[in-house]
Amino acid sequence: MPQALIIFTSLTGNTEACADFLADALEQHDIEVTIEDVMQADPHDFLDYDICLVGTYTYGVDGVLPDEMLDFYDDLLELDLTGKVSGVFGSGDTFYEVFCGAVDTMESAFLTVGATKGGDSVKVNLNPEEEDEANLQALADSIAAKFN
């Protein structure tokens, strides 16, 4: 049975809601899921899992990673995740010029360290709605397909 680790950070609860939904969607595919808050996680934890997922909100007008994700990001770039399947999701606000830039930053980091992109990243405007849940389900389905 494939195992997935979802590491997330959430300021308002929106990204956490996405993490919970994605976990349920993956479990429907008989994937065992662990969820950790980034403040209690270490990127090296990904080495023990088949599937590596990160959820992050985007902070501020420049679309940057939130402070609590910075050290995690730096440490992630030191890993070799070749053979792992990755996915990224997060929330932001279309009010800002750079929408969900942190999602793009994390997706790039996974590709840099050799992970295989599991599916299209999911960018959520504020709180997840029906369309966002469909996109999270599609990400879970795409990831699961890589193990069947």
Image: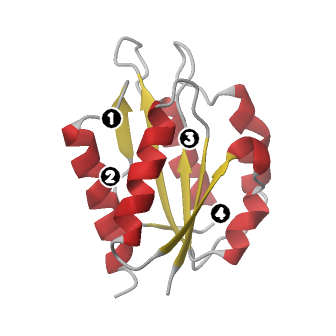
- Residue 140 placement (x, y as % from top left): 35, 64
Q: Nearer the viewer, mark 1 or mark 4?
A: 1
Reading the image, the residue beneath label 3 is 105
Tag 2 secondary structure: helix
Tag 3 secondary structure: helix
Residue drawn at (57%, 77%) of the image: 50
Residue drawn at (34%, 18%) of the image: 94
Reading the image, the residue beneath label 1 is 128
Tag 4 secondary structure: loop
Reading the image, the residue beneath label 4 is 113
Task: Tell me if label 2 and label 1 are in contact, CB under 8 Å.
Answer: yes
Q: Nearer the viewer, residue 16 or 101?
A: 16
Reading the image, the residue beneath label 2 is 136
Q: Quadrant of residue 119?
A: bottom left
Q: Is residue 5 above or below residue 13?
A: below
Q: CA distance from mark 4 to mark 2?
A: 23 Å
Amino acid marked by disc 1: Pro
- Residue 62 placement (x, y as % from top left): 54, 17
| Between discs 3 and 4, the one toward the N terminus | 3
Amino acid marked by disc 3: Thr
- Residue 101 placement (x, y as % from top left): 49, 31
Amino acid marked by disc 4: Val
| Between discs 2 and 1, the one toward the N terminus | 1
